Amino acid sequence: MSLLAVRNARKAFGTVGALDGASLELRAGELLGLLGPNGAGKTTLVRAIAGRVRLDAGEVEMLGQPLAPGSTRPELGVVPQEIAVYPLLTAHENLEAFGRLHGLAGKALAARVAWALDWTGLDGRAREPVKRFSGGMRRRLNIACGVLHEPRVLLLDEPTVGVDPQSRERIYEMLAALRKGGTSLLLTTHQLDEAEGLCDRIVVIDHGRVIAAGRLAELIADTVGEGRRVSLSVDRMPAQALLGLEPDAAGTTLSAHVKDVAAELPALLQKAASAGLEVRDVAVRGPSLHAVFIHLTGRELRE
C-alpha cells in the first residue's frame, strides 16, 4: 500500500528548473532513501511534499487523497536539516511548544512530551536550555519535535549530519522504534553507507528526474553488476603491466574485477608471484551503493 505518492512533479524557479517530472512512492512501513547530488532536486521535492513549495505541475497524494496546495497535513511529520528548535528554551519547553503547534494539549501533550524525552535519552537534561546541548542532543530533540503528533509519514532531511558516531547510532535506534510503531519514513542523506544499511528501497534523483529506484540488489544488478573487486596490496609495482591487474594511483595495490572469487583469486595470486611481487594483503569488496551512485550520476563535482 502506498501512503505517499508524488507524480510527475515539476517546479522551476525563474529560468532554473528544480523538478522535471519526478515521481516516487512511499509504501506502508517502509524506509525509503532519497539520494542525489547537490542541486538534484531533493530539497525541492521534500518541500513540495511538506507543502512549503507549490508545484508548477504534478501532484502529491497522502493516503490516496490529493494534497491541495496550502492544505493542512496532520498525517505528515517533517524534520528539517537545519536545527529548528529554540536555543533559549529547555528541551521540555521546546517539546511543549511544538506539541501545541501540532494541536496537542492537556494530558495528551504531557504524555507525548514525557515519551519524547525518554525516547531521545534527554529526560535527564529536560530542564536545561538547549543552547547547552551538544550537536547530537539537538539533533535528537529536532527529530522529537517533528513526531510528537504521531504522524503516519515522516520526512527526514539529513537527520544525522554533523553528529558523532554514538549520537548517530542513537538516532538509528530512534528511527527503528518509529518504524516499529507504524511510521513510514522518507530519508534524504549524502551518507551512502547510511542509506545502504537502513533503507528498504532507494530512489536516486538527478536534474529533477528520478533516474533509478528499487532495492539495493536491483540497483546493483541494473548498473555496476554483481561481481567483486579484488585488491592485492604488494611490496612494489611490477616492472611490466600484468594483464587483468590494474595498479592504483598510489602504486601500492593491484586490482581486478572478478565474477567468481574462489575460482579466479588463485590465478591472480600466482600472476603476482610470478612477477616477483610479495602480496602483503588481499581485500575483496562487493558492489556498493557508492559505486551505483557514481555510475548513475557521474564523478562531476557539484557545488
Image: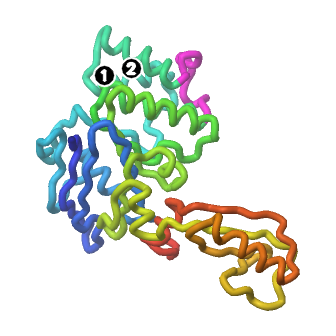
- Residue positioned 44% across, 14% down in the render: 114
Which quarter of the rendering shows the N terminus?
top left
Q: Which mark is residue 242?
A: none
Badge 2: residue crowd in 10 Å (few <14, some 14–19, many ≥20): many
**Residue found at the far bottom of this picture:** 240
The residue carrying mark 1 is 100
Disc 2 element: helix
Q: Position of residue 155 (x, y in %)?
A: 35, 42
Q: Identify which residue is drawn at 17% across, 46% down.
A: 61
Q: Amino acid at mark 1?
A: Arg
Is residue 127 rendered magenta in the image?
A: yes
Q: Which residue is mark 2?
A: 96
Residue type marked 2:
Glu
CA gap, disc 1 to disc 2? 6 Å
Give the percent coordinates (x, y) of residue 285.
Answer: 62, 61
* Range drawn in magenta: 121-134
